Amino acid sequence: METWFLIQTKSRQESCAIENLERQGIGSFCPSIMIEKLSRGRRVVVSEALFPGYLFVNFDHNRVSATTVCSTRGVSHFVSTAGVPVRVPEDLIASLMQRDFEQIGKGIAGALTAGDNLEILDGPFRGLNAVFTQPDGDSRAIVLINFLNQPVKAVMSLASLHKLDRAKAS
C-alpha cells in the first residue's frame, strides 16, 4: 500500500530530487508558490517551493526500499521520529493539492475591478477580507479593510491578495 512520507532534500535541489524520483517510479509532490522578489532592480514574480528543502513522496515501502529513496540524487534523508520515517496523512496531501498556490499573486492585477472582494494572504491583516479600489503601480493595490467597523485604506502587494468568488465573499 502506497503511503506519503516527508523527505528533506539537499539545498535547492527539490526539482532534481523530483526528476530522479519520477525516473524510479516514485511519486512526489512539492507545492510551490509565486513570490514577488527584486531581481536586478526590478520586481519579478517567481515560483518557489512552499516548503523549501522538503518534498512529499508516495511509495509502497514493501516494494521500494527506503534506502533507494535516500540514495536518490537530490534527496538528503527522511524526516523521522525516533528513527522511524514520518508518515503524512493522505487528507493533508489532498488539502495541499487542492490549494492553488501557483495562482497566488500571478496575474491578479488585470483581473481586478473596483469593488472586487479579496482575501489578504499574508502580513498583519492575514485572513481578513478587503475590497479592491484601484491599482497602485504594477505590483500594489489600494484596498479598503473593515477595521473596527470603519473602512480603512491600505496599500498592499498584489502577491498578498487573492480574489474571492462571489459565493465566498458573502
Image (tube, rainbow, N blue to C red):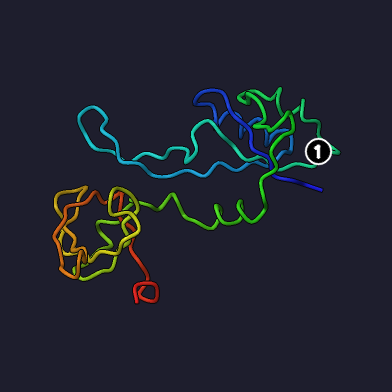
Image coords of residue 143 (percent x, y): 19, 60
**SS for callout 1:** loop
Q: Residue at x 70, y 33 (%)?
A: 23
Locate the C terminus by quadrant. Answer: bottom left
In the drawing, does residue 32 fall left or right of residue 133?
Answer: right
In the drawing, does residue 84 fall left or right of residue 127?
Answer: right
What amino acid is at disc 1? Answer: His
The residue under label 1 is 61
Q: Residue at x 36, y 39 (%)?
A: 46
Viewer-nearest residue: 54 or 73? 54
In the drawing, does residue 91 fall left or right of residue 150?
Answer: right
Q: Residue at x 77, y 47 (%)?
A: 2
Viewer-nearest residue: 122 or 46? 122
Q: Residue at x 23, y 66 (%)?
A: 131
Residue 22, by quadrant, is top right
Q: Is residue 11 above or below residue 37?
A: above
In the drawing, does residue 61 fall left or right of residue 81?
Answer: right
Q: Is residue 93 above or below residue 42?
A: below
Image coords of residue 78 (percent x, y): 67, 30
Viewer-nearest residue: 15 or 5? 5
Image coords of residue 126 (percent x, y): 33, 54
- Crowd around label 1: few <14 · some 14–19 · many ≥20 (10 Å): few
- Marks counted in the figure total 1
Farthest residue, direction right: 62
